Image (tube, rainbow, N blue to C red):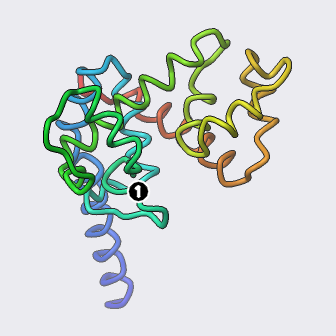
Amino acid sequence: MWAALAAAALGLIRWWQWVHLESSQDQVILAAAARYGVEPALVKAVVWRESKFDPLARGRKGEIGLMQIMKTTADEWAAAEKIPVFYHEMLFDPALNTRAGAWYLGRLARRYRNTDDPLPYTLADYNAGRGNALRWAAGPAATNSRLFLENITFPGTSNYVLAVLHRRHKYLASFPPR
């Protein structure tokens, strides 16, 4: 009986920690989304998938922070924002990281505005790069997101896109808070 109670208590503690963690970056996400006109639920879903809300997350290919921003993307953002002194490690700051990531998501979404749903294209490009996204957007898949999703040849990218879309849908109900 004590073991069951201890397990239940541990489960409750972990649930509370997750709920707290999942809302820990809400203010910086809202600010970045507003600044670049990107849907807050989308930014939060990308943060969830990329770093699980850990601002010190590091990827295998040099990506860092909440939205796992690569150095080249960071440098493009800093140049567009006219930040005079910038180095990639500054993106461990959650506010700067979400700003760079929201800027990049907005930029990618504009590339695919002539599709029936820009989000799958945007997310595939964010995850696997423009060259791969363009390859998967061949023929009728250039404007039909269902066909585009079927054309994605990287299982990791396909899973990424579907997971972020699912999480975004979940967040739309409550984020931003009314």
Does 118 sit above or below residue 51? above
Pick whichever, 1 or 3, lies toward us.
3
Q: Residue furthest right?
A: 139
Secondary structure type for disc 1: loop
How many tags in the picture? 1
Residue 21 locus on image (x, y percent): 25, 55
Q: Nearer the viewer, residue 51 or 165?
A: 51
- Identified at 35% across, 35% down, the residue is 76
Left or right of 160: which side holds 152? right
The residue that appears at 72% across and 23% down in the rendered structure is 145
Q: Which three-letter amino acid code belongs to the residue tagged 1?
A: Glu
Mark 1 — residue? Answer: 63
Question: For this rendering, which residue is in front, 43 or 8?
Answer: 43
Q: Nearer the viewer, residue 170 or 52?
A: 52
Image coordinates for residue 9, horizontal then vertical, percent: 28, 75
Look at the image and tell me in which quarter the N terminus lies. bottom left
Location of residue 135 (image quadrant): top right
Disc 1: CA contacts within 10 A as few (<14), some (14-19) or many (>=20): many
User: Measuring 61% from the left and 38% from the top, which residue is drawn there?
Assistant: 124
Question: Looking at the image, is 74 positioned above or below residue 119?
Answer: below
Which picture quadrant has residue 105? Answer: top left
From the viewer's perspective, tell me whether residue 141 is left or right of residue 14: right
Outermost residue toward the top in this view = 114
Where is residue 56, by image quadrant?
bottom left
Q: What's the residue at 36%, 22% (across, down)?
A: 38
Q: Position of residue 146 (x, y in %)?
A: 76, 25
**Farthest left residue in view:** 85
Say left or right for 152 vs 78. right
User: Which image quarter is the C terminus in?
Assistant: top left
Q: Residue 166, position in %: x, y?
A: 55, 38
